[in-house]
Image (tube, rainbow, N blue to C red):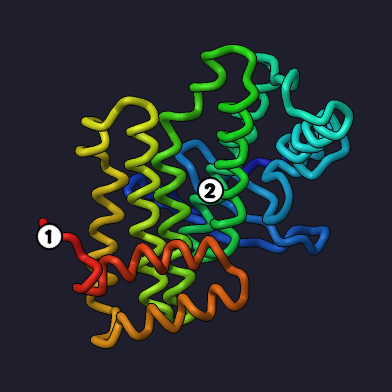
């Protein structure tokens, strides 16, 4: 087996401590991959599937494997009662979540917001699965401290994708929904005071203020049209976000402070 010295490659792509340096390459097998420059070298990730290219138990991901297990359990028993994830299983899911974290950070830098949504959704589904079915109480809570960050990244990706489609009102609705979801998380976990100083909420509020300047003067009319279209096309989650945004935009629906 021969080994390749990466020194020349690393010198051609120097590490910059204050910058997240990411690039896409075409592999020798004609597959697109993502590379991230880190202090001690280069991380390389698959652009599709699991970032490390693994197929646990023959599935696309470990999450998919356990979701299939859960579905079979429910089909066999008519309920999810009795289904659980052991400590090693929860640990392995946390490792998978960390792989997806690295990739969605890289994708965000590359401004591939649809794929950021794909990966943040994957991470949130891992959080939900562990929180709901972890046998050990510590495993049920282990990922919850990271939920506000992932929700923030998901909301930002939704907003920037909406802006790409010239939907400023929808972008603002996505950000406001993200703020509400993070606040709800802190309320559920008895950390309302922590939520008030939450950095993720601050970032989303800053983005919301920037988006308000992009929303046209007739934003109420625009939002209502977007709401009707979302309902007609059965995009109910977006419709819920737009309803929330209308409450913020329409003075008649605002409650007095």
Mark with earlier residue (1, 2): 2
Q: Nearer the viewer, residue 14 or 142?
A: 142
What residue is drawn where x is 39% and y is 67%?
A: 243
Mark 1 against mark 2, which lies toward the viewer? 1
Q: Which residue is the site of mark 2?
A: 10
Question: Which quadrant of the figure has residue 28?
Answer: bottom right
Q: Considering only vertical position in the picture, is 83 above or below 193?
A: above
Inspect this view and state whether residue 60 appears.
yes
Q: Split into 4 quadrants, where in the image is the N terminus?
A: top right
- At 40% from the left edge and 80% from the top edge, which residue is drawn? 224
Residue 14 position, x and y percent, is 45, 51
Q: Report x, y in % for residue 250.
A: 25, 74
Q: Residue at x 43, y 63 (%)?
A: 241
Q: Residue 55 location in percent, x, y?
A: 81, 39
x then y, percent, for residue 19: 37, 52
Mark 2 closeness class: few <14, some 14–19, many ≥20 residues within 10 Å? some
The residue beneath circle 1 is 256
Q: Quadrant of the C terminus?
A: bottom left
Q: Quadrant location of residue 214?
A: bottom left
Whether the residues at callouts 1 and 2 have beta carbons within 8 Å, the answer is no
Q: Determine whether the residue tagged by mark 1 lies in a helix, strand or loop.
A: loop
Distance from Cα at disc 1 to Cα at disc 2? 59 Å
**Which residue occupies the foreground of this view, 193 or 75?**
75
């Amino acid at each position: 087996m021969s080994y390749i010295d990466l020194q020349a490659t690393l010198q051609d792509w120097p590490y910059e401590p204050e910058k997240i340096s990411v690039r896409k390459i075409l592999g020798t097998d004609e597959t697109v991959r993502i590379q991230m420059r880190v202090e001690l070298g280069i991380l390389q990730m698959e652009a599709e599937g699991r970032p490390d290219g693994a197929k646990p138990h023959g599935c696309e991901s470990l999450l998919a494997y356990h979701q299939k297990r859960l579905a079979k359990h429910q089909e066999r028993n008519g309920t999810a009662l009795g289904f659980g994830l052991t400590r090693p299983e929860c640990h392995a899911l946390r490792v998978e979540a960390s792989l997806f974290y690295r990739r969605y950070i890289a994708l965000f830098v590359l401004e591939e917001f649809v794929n950021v949504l794909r990966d943040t959704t994957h991470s949130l589904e891992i959080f939900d699965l562990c929180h709901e079915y972890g046998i050990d109480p510590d495993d049920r809570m282990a990922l919850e401290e990271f939920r506000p960050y992932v929700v923030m990244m998901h909301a930002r990706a939704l907003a920037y994708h909406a802006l790409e489609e010239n939907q400023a009102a929808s972008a603002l609705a996505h950000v406001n929904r993200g703020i509400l979801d993070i606040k709800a998380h802190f309320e559920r976990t008895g950390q309302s005071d922590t939520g008030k100083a939450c950095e993720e909420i601050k970032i989303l509020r800053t983005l919301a203020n920037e988006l308000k300047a992009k929303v046209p003067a007739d934003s109420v009319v625009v939002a209502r049209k977007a709401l009707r279209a979302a309902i007609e096309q059965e995009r109910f989650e977006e419709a819920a976000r737009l309803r929330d945004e209308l409450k913020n935009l329409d003075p008649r629906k605002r409650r007095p402070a």
